[in-house]
Image (cartoon, rainbow, N blue to C red):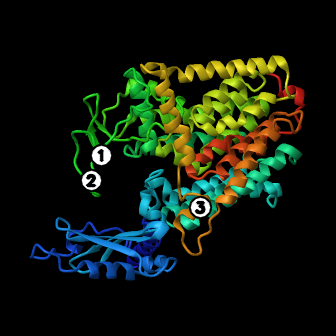
Amino acid sequence: MRQLAVAGVLAVALAVLIAPAATAAEPTTAATGTTSTNPLEEPFPPETAGPRMTERSAVATFVRFPKVARWLERYPADPTTDAVFDEATHRWTVKVWSGRAGQIALGKVEDGDGRVSEAWTGPQVAWGMARGRVGSFGGKVLNAWWMWVPLSIVFFVGLADWRRIVSLHSLDLLALLSFGLSLLYFNRGEILLSAPLAALPLAYLLVRMCWIGFRGRAPAPALFWPVWLLAAVAVFLGGLRVGLNLETPRGVIDVGLAGVIGGDRILDGRAPYGNMPVSGTKRSCGKKDADGSIRDWIQDNGRCEAALPRGDTYGPVASLAYVPAVLVFPWSGKWDSLPAAHATAIAFDLLAVVGLFLVGRRFGGPPLAAALVFGWMALPFTAYTLNSNTNDAIMPAILIWGFWLSASPVARGAAVALSGWTKFATLLLAPLWLTYPNGLSRRAVARFAAAFAVATGLAFSILLLEPNLLDTVRTFGEHTLRYQLDRGSPFSPWDWGQYHARGIPDLGAVQLILQIGVLVLAGVVAVIPARKGPLELAALSAAVLIGFEFALTHWSYLYIPWFLPFVLVALFLPRDKPESEALLP
């Protein structure tokens, strides 16, 4: 009897633990969850070939659905509608338009029982990644609450100053972790909540980094954990991260695929720009997916390749970085497991870790080295980026090594160039890194400029692979800078004016002011303060990068690693070391 009681208690406890996990793992944006895959739960198709519902009734059913009805209340009455019946699936695809806003709703209605199986509104209409597909970025395991919450707790507990727990330092750590609240709503497809919730910590960190860079910081926090424990936990977390990456072979998003294709094109003797695989060629070579679209097409090189026409939107270093891995793991032409993308993501994650260790050891000794490495390993968003297998660790990894060698203008110039031709945001750091540490001097400027020019020339040498250099340069500009500047996106609050919806603000003017402010900040930090040490360089570098992201239209959680290393250095770098010693190689 006692054993039965114990078993009952364990069963109840297990149910309590599993229930929230199941709740967290399912997106809430679909009409009734996602369409059921259980054949016993699917409605039987009608025996007749024709539909049971009419176009009018399908539209009426869809617009009455609560989620859709709430969104349509933001628009004038009597929107334009259309419904198309698919005989293969016995579903109606319903679309709704409203004036300047264009298409404002999209969904599917089951013809058999009139059930709304999909309902997408606002940003979800055009953006599949806005529909709450948990695990599309970072994998389902990392996004699960039982993985994310413990990692966040470990990050805070390991880096908090428990002697002064009520302090700005604690608030800084919580600000870094608070992006997780925004991610929660992003995974649910609630973009109008997730975007402003991400903007708030960006704004806070921007102000904090400016304050530290211009006004200084209190003494370094006293870490509660000893160095050996920080190091041991960091090693464990490193193994966990790599394990999660390798256990998710299909976890490569389009950014990682773009890098692999770019590396493949370079090895084939072509520049990536204008040579990415496209769709709609003379012949397809793949099956239709659930949406009826075909991914694989025969390209002009005769190969069957996955189409990614916008994969050449990054700088040349973003493709060159994948060349070694593509040499070892050649691209199959498919969007499969892409081992070259996994290898590159892991390699640059480790390079960032080694760079942080060297920075910490040089500027603060073993305690700072352990804190920086631990901070990178424990914050879930670096694992999020690693598990997505993107190119977003390449830029910070290069900058970290440049910071380690910051006493050399040659190292600073090369680092800014190579990272800038990976992600263009880094180019804003050129004035700051040029004038570090004591302003302009003829010799330092010449060496910085020479290193920047040589690194730039080496990066853009891949354009010489094309027969017409001028056409290739033009294509590069159109596919990278022009595309990025004209890109619309709902993942920050700045582009919501495109929806012309009642109650949704148009903040385009505010964004323009912020963008001008970031450009001004990039210039101001070059001259104020006149004399800078490693703390000021780190804090102001973080401020410029955070400012860029804060004013960016298309923002992503994958961009957090861009500024994280410099935030960590700014928060933990000791202030008691003589400045002259800190500047020595």
Question: Which residue occupies the foreground of this view, 162 or 450?
Answer: 450
Label 2 sits on what residue type?
Answer: Asp
The secondary element bearing badge 2 is classed as loop
Q: Amino acid at mark 3?
A: Ala
Q: In what element is the residue under mark 1?
A: loop
In the rendered structure, the answer to whether residue 525 lies left or right of residue 14 reads right
Q: Is residue 277 left or right of residue 253?
A: left
Placement of 494 over or under 358, stated as above or below? below
Residue plotted at (64% across, 40% down): 425
Location of residue 580 (image quadrant):
top right
Name the disc covering residue 195, or none.
3
Mark 1 and mark 3 in contact (Cβ < 8 Å)? no
Residue 161 visible in the current orientation: no
Say the numbered circle drawn on residue 75.
none
Give the image location of residue 145, x and y in percent: 52, 61
Marks 2 and 3 sit apart, C-alpha to C-alpha, by 30 Å
**Mark 2 or 3 closer to N-term?**
3
Instruction: Check whether the beta carbons of the residues at disc 1 and disc 2 lie within 8 A of each other.
Output: yes
Where disc 3 sits, the SS reads helix
Q: Which residue is mark 2?
A: 289
Mark 1 or mark 2, earlier in chain: 2
Mark 2 burial class by Cα count in 10 Å: few <14, some 14-19, many 20+ = few
Look at mark 1 in the image and give the residue it sits on: 295
Name which residue type carries label 1.
Arg
Q: Quadrant of the C terminus?
A: top right
Horizontal relation, residue 191 to residue 567: left or right: left
Residue 482 in sight: yes
